[in-house]
Amino acid sequence: MKRYFRIEFTLQVTTGASVKRGSILFMVGNQFSS
């Protein structure tokens, strides 16, 4: 149970980081295109 929770937590952290990075890249791309 604890191991599963740790895997779930790691997945949430990695996806959150990638989403944050993607949104930053998206905002920068919008500024350059406009």
Image (tube, helix red, strand yellow):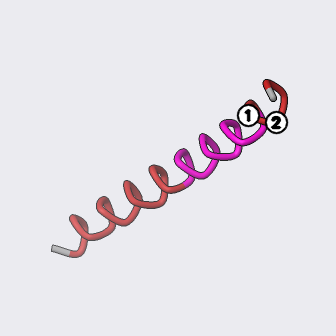
Q: Residues within 10 Å of mark 2 (few under 14, many from 20)?
A: few
Q: Mark 1: which amino acid? A: Asn
Between 16 and 7, the one lying in front of the other is 16
Q: Residue at x 73, y 34 (%)?
A: 30
Question: Percent position (x, y) of residue 17?
Answer: 56, 53
SS for callout 2 = helix
Image disc number at residue 15: none
Q: Are marks 1 and 2 in contact (CB under 8 Å)?
A: yes
Residue on which the image places disc 1 = 30
Residue on which the image places disc 2 = 31
Q: Is residue 19 magenta?
A: yes
- Range of the magenta residues? 17-28
Structural distance between the alpha carbons of marks 1 and 2: 4 Å
Between 26 and 33, the one lying in front of the other is 33
Question: Percent position (x, y) of residue 31?
Answer: 82, 36
Q: Residues within 10 Å of mark 1 (few under 14, many from 20)?
A: few
Between 20 and 26, the one lying in front of the other is 26
Q: Which quadrant would residue 8 be assigned to in this image? A: bottom left
Horizontally, residue 9 falls left or right of residue 14, namely left
Q: Mark 2: which amino acid? A: Gln
Horizontally, residue 3 falls left or right of residue 21, namely left
Query: In the image as oriented, which residue stretches furthest toward the left?
Result: 1
Q: Residue at x 23, y 75 (%)?
A: 2
Q: Residue at x 41, y 59 (%)?
A: 10
Secondary structure mostly seen in magenta is: helix
Horizontally, residue 22 falls left or right of residue 30, namely left
Quadrant occupied by the N terminus: bottom left
Relative to 8, say whether 33 is above or below: above
